[in-house]
Amino acid sequence: MDEAVTKSLNEALTDVMTRFRSFFLAHMNEDHVPFRHRKDFTAPLVTVMGHTYGARVVENEASGGQANLAVEVSANVYDDEFELERFESTIEDAHQPDRLEKTIENFLSPEDPDYVEKEGGTLLPSLFSCDFHRDLELTRKEKQSPSRVTGRLVDIVLSMKYWIQPDQLDRLSGDLLLFKSAVYFYCLRSFVLAYHESLRSD
């Protein structure tokens, strides 16, 4: 895979995470929505109400040596009673065309291409390939120092990979405005909305 393409897409995610943070800054103090920086993320992570969200482009060597790129969105999980099965259901629902259109309607801004509003429900899903069971992962990461939130020496991270369709890579890398809008709505916003819904008590 062209390293320049991967680098360019990763750098574009800085604008995505800045936009995500800016939404909350309309209602919250900057100190309550901090940027965090990690060596394995080009774009800054954003912490909102104790939950830290990140986005990065990752590469996977598929069979035959052909490289695939995915946008990986993640969040720290602090709830001991978090149910992955429940999240699988909510995230799949969050990506249904009617829900996606509502997400776009709620968070649309002038920086998005005009056709995202008109075709978003059909356009954005065509850019990515994902399986809400296979591409969803809950992992434990050992820490050198205790978590500021839990006090534990382990982080539990929920992540979802959105694989960029091979025939759409040139389009997205050549139109970073579309890439940023697609990631913001289809990947980040839908993931976060599903995460919040899965945490709600019945």
Image (cartoon, grey):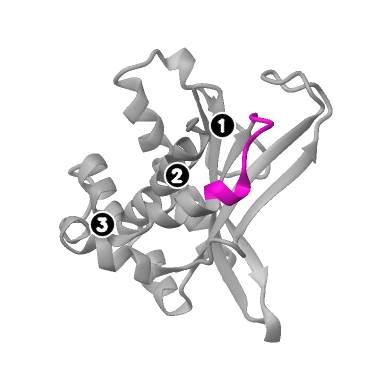
Residue 182, placed above or below residue 110 = below
Residue named by callout 2? 194
**The stretch drawn in magenta includes residue 96:** no
Q: Amino acid at mark 1?
A: Thr
Q: Main secondary structure of the magenta part?
A: loop
Give the Cα distance between marks 1 and 3.
27 Å
Boundaries of the magenta span: 78-87
How packed mark 2 is, by other alpha carbons closer than 10 Å (few <14, some 14-19, many 20 or more), is many
| Earlier residue among tags 1 and 3 | 1
How packed mark 1 is, by other alpha carbons closer than 10 Å (few <14, some 14-19, many 20 or more), is some
Q: What residue appears at the point 36 percent right and 71 percent down from the top-left corner?
A: 126
| Earlier residue among tags 2 and 1 | 1
Residue 98's tag is 3
Give the Cα distance between marks 2 and 1.
15 Å
Q: Amino acid at mark 3?
A: Asp
Looking at the rendering, in which quadrant would you find the N terminus?
bottom right
Q: What residue appears at the point 49 percent right and 53 percent down from the top-left corner?
A: 89
Q: Secondary structure at mark 1?
A: strand
Residue 8, placed above or below residue 108 = below
The answer to whether residue 1 of the structure is visible from this angle is no
| Earlier residue among tags 3 and 2 | 3
Q: Residue furthest bottom?
A: 64
Give the Cα distance between marks 3 and 2.
14 Å
Residue named by callout 1? 52
Nearest to viewer (mark 1 / mark 3): 3
The answer to whether residue 20 of the structure is visible from this angle is yes
Q: Nearer the viewer, residue 135 or 58?
A: 135
